[in-house]
Amino acid sequence: MFQVSFVQFIDDVTPEQWAALQTAENPFVDYRYLQALEESQSVGNGTGWQVHHLLLHDEGGALVGAVPCYLKQHSYGEYVFDWGWADAYRRAGIAYYPKMVCAVPFTPATGGRLLTVSGSDEQVGKICRLLAEALIEEARRLNASSVHCLFLPEREVTVLTDEGWLPRHDLQFHWSNQGYEQFADFLASFSSKKRKNVNRERRRVREAGVEMEVLTGDELTAEHWRLFYQLYRFTAYKRGGTAYLTEKFFELIAEHMADSVVMVMARENDRYVAAALNFRGGDTLYGRYWGCLTEYDSLHFETCYYRAIEYCIAEGIARYEAGAQGEHKLSRGFLPTTTHSAHWLAHPQFADAVADYLDDEREQIAGYQEMLQAHTPFRRS
């Protein structure tokens, strides 16, 4: 007999219990990352992200499954856009919020959502199905309109679609390490024109007198983190966005997860002018946040892409996921990659309408991806 519970704090389980779950070394479902979001008040009261994590214990009291889950009163910070669905509900006089979102807030990175202990395929599948059923039962209990599991690995998409959830596709641009020994090997795979463009962008940064640093772990001081928060906050507001994460969040990451951080910093003379924050997990580097004080020609590409790729090559890292959207990444060696989500809607008629919409959307995404593949920078064999 399994016991289902929903909790308002990750602290309701211990780090040791959470560590027994399979997270594929993804830094964003690491206990410390989720705890930092909560302790820093980046999520919780007043943010529209009410913590509502699902826990599944076996009859002996051991944690065998969990889902990072939040009750949402809006659709900000998700990167899988359902504003049109919310508007359709509004026009029909039906409440779309609250809804349940199974994801890592503000983080468009694929990773486990139906977390389980290790076991046979049959055992893991059973736990995943129990988690999916528990999410739907809780949504009905709360009168939530829907449940959304975002940025799923394909295995979890299969589980949920087999249970009747609606699959959704989108695209990101990811870099793949083809066994390069140095950055020049990577560029050698480009067409001549595209290779010259990259070299020109890198040269412009050098000619501007900007020097680059790549810092990890204990190399990052409290001053580095303070400066990064200023850059992150300044850039978010300059672009008309919202700095969702508090300064306390970065302080907690610095204290507890610095070993997972790769920060690229740009310095002009004695002043840092830009930085990009990446997280390393398993065989993947994840680009997350960027900030700059002054605009420099091509500095964004050098800081967020080229230096990160150099790091991946030097460290033997297989993939670099540089965040959401961005067709401009294509010409710089990032290939279109399908991302996955799955959705359950309580209202039968709306569920049918959304299912039809998603059928069309997946077809459009596939066509768009095929078109992009014809415009990669790589030499044709």
Image (cartoon, rainbow, N blue to C red):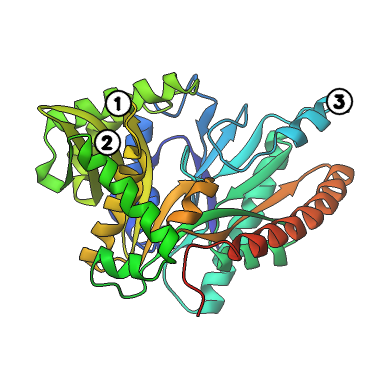
Which badge, 3 or 1, comes first in the chain's sequence? 3
Q: Quadrant of residue 126?
A: bottom right
Front position among marks 3 and 1: 1
User: Label 1 is placed on what type of residue?
Assistant: Leu
Dot 1 corresponds to which residue? 231
Label 2 sits on what residue type? Answer: Ala
The answer to whether 363 appears left or right of 320 in the picture is right
Quadrant containing the N terminus in the rendered view: bottom right
Please state if 193 lies on the left or on the right of 251 as rendered: right
Secondary structure of the residue carrying numbered label 1: helix
| Image position of 212 with respect to 129: above or below | above
Q: CA distance from mark 1 to mark 2?
A: 7 Å
What numbered label is drawn on residue 91? Answer: 3
User: Label for residue 275?
Assistant: 2
Q: Which quadrant would residue 88 be assigned to in this image?
A: top right
Judging depth in this view, the residue of 377 and 217 nearest the camera is 377
Judging depth in this view, the residue of 337 and 118 nearest the camera is 337
Asked whether the residues under the numbered discs 1 and 2 touch, taking CB atoms below 8 Å apart as contact, a structural biologist would say yes
Is the residue marked by circle 2 packed among few (<14), some (14-19), or many (20+) residues within 10 Å? many
